[in-house]
Image (tube, coloured by chain):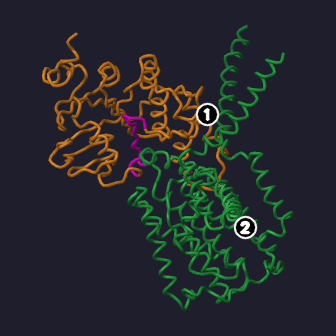
Amino acid sequence: MTDQSIFLSASKPRHDSDAATRRALDDLRRVGRLRPAELLFWGAALASFLVLPGSHLLLSQTAILGLFALSLDLIIGYAGIVSLGHGAFFGLGAYTAGIVSVRLTEEPLSGLVLGGLVAALAGALTGPLLTMRATDLSRLMVTLGIATLLHEGANQLTWLTGGADGLSGVTVAPILGLFEFDLIGTTGYGYCLIVSFVLFLAARRVVTSPYGLSLRAIRDNALRARAMGIPVAARLVGIYAFSAFIAGVAGALLTQVTMFTSLDVLGFERSADVLLVLVLGGVGYLYGGLIGAVLFTVLQDRLATLSPQYWQFWIGLILVVIVLIGRDRLAAVPVRLRAGLSGRKAAAGEGEA
Amino acid sequence: MSGALQTIGLSKRFGGLTATDDVSFTLGHGARHALIGPNGAGKTTFINLLTGVLSANEGTILLEGEDVTRMPQQQRARRGLGRTFQINQLFGAMTPVESVGLAVSERMGGGGQFWRRLGKRTDIVDEIVELLRQFRLIEVMDEPTARLPYGKQRLLEIAVALASQPRVLLLDEPAAGVPEAERGELLDTLAALPRDVSILLIEHDMDLVFSFADRISVLVNGALFAEGTPEVMRNDPRVQDVYLGSDNHV
């Protein structure tokens, strides 16, 4: 009898404790869990490579834009840093890859990695400027200012960049000495896809780590994060440099698959476009940039066929609608429609019976 | 003897207003010390000076004897100065498990690890569950913080601060706005806070102050007005006059 009561009192809390631990573990692992829709997305990306050989050039551009927008999502969606000058890092990567090819080596992976590293260095150096006055307006202006400085710098350094004529003479050797870049862009697209996928996996790993959790905390409430002992500025500079690395790699990819680069990689329009792409696809879940790039490319293509001169009007209109109405409410429309339809059907069924 | 936290001649001015006026104050080791005073007496300004949200115009702040007067917030926090906020400062989109887990992993120096998956360190998870149990947050552990009842959010506010294992804990009106039905839970958890943590409580609720504190300081117009045991303070006519008077007619 005594034995049994001891057994009972000892085992009951033990069991509760296990259940609580399991729930806590489950909650911590929630953000990192692979969802079926993710497999679907990457399956579709692979399928596009296999079944759309005629579109590989366009698809390469889409993948590069998507990777670039993904880099922007890391700072906007996960760290709450807005930027109007992310093109600076894209352009730095693009020019670095081009200059590496012209002056150093035609081997593509060197140019790719160096492009990313130069951009990351620039991100690490300019990041602290964004943590000094942490208002959105000051961040927009600082990022815009830096991008403008770089654009003018590239324009002036003609001996290095080719200035307004662009950097010509970029040649790229076969990847790993095996895959030669072809005219219809098949190697290029495969290259872009693999690089994007690898960097996506790295970004996913980072945002689902304890470091990623601390970024979400800073975005939610920087005051509390500081009170917790989190070195806010250092954490933000870290993600800014990582984001710049990915943007730089995206720029390097563009130079390598087009074998050319010019001032427009550093232009304001590129920074604005990538922000538009990210908002189109949605902020803060890592796929927004990738999906936004696909949407943007399809829209651009369709709208340009519909009204060749006014397609940007429609893009602008769609953007305003998305921002004002909100993606959640737009996404809820089909669900509500379906519910409404089935409700009506059920009512009609009752009427017949 | 400097105590767990000490200020010497601490002053803060906003333009012509002196919000903190030459305050020399000592929080003893393991103390349960309450800081009271009428509205606008400068209690929250004092807390903000101690934690580094504001920087003082004059004076010195010593944490366990170390001068932290010019140190930024997060470094004071890392040296063992914890706080809760009068108005909840939580991470609305995160769950209690994530919020407490973040504080624990930051304390252990793992907050900067960018290549480790969350939920891999069982020692951290055990500590999270232990804290959530202590603060009666087990049932709501995986719900977004913004959706929790107010009383639970107040409890989480303290749980997050305690997860950093502070040596000194500043509680800024922990019972403020908590509905009557949820108060008992909060007072119980306050009473059960570990004895080795030195606590400074700022509070309007006199029942809570007298049940919790073993020492009371009164702040009036930014200056320290009186200090003593709860008994002495309760019977001090000057204190009753400036602060307790209207409340203690009964």
Q: What residue type is labelled 2?
A: Val
> Please, is residue A257 above or below residue A144 in the view?
below
Q: Mark 1 points at which residue?
A: B142
> Please, is residue A329 above or below residue A127 in the view?
above
Chain depicted in green: A
Q: How far separated are the C-alphas under marks 2 and 1?
A: 35 Å
Q: Residue at x 52, y 68 (%)?
A: A123
Viewer-closest of A12 and A174: A174
Quarter-wise, where is residue B204 in the image? top left
Q: Which chain carries label 1?
A: B
Indicate the position of residue B143 as horizontal and vertical percent values. Answer: 59, 33
- Which quadrant of the figure contains the N terminus of chain B? top left
Q: Colour of chain B?
A: orange
Q: Can residue B222 be seen by looking at this rendering? A: yes
Q: Is mark 1 on a helix, strand or loop?
A: loop
- Which quadrant of the figure contains the C terminus of chain B? top left
Magenta stretch: residue B77 in it? yes
Q: Name the residue under label 2.
A: A195
Indicate the position of residue A135 as horizontal and vertical percent values. Answer: 40, 56
Q: Residue at x 29, y 45 (%)?
A: B49
Q: Which chain carries label 2?
A: A
> Please, is residue A22 above or below residue A213 in the view?
above
Quarter-wise, where is residue A290 in the image? bottom right
- Name the residue at the bottom extreme: A159
Q: Which amino acid does label 1 sit on?
A: Asp
Q: How crowded is mark 1: few (under 14 residues within 10 Å), some or many (20 or more)?
A: many
> Magenta region: which residues?
B75-88
Magenta stretch: residue B171 in it? no
Q: Which residue is drawn at 77% across and 70% down?
A: A189
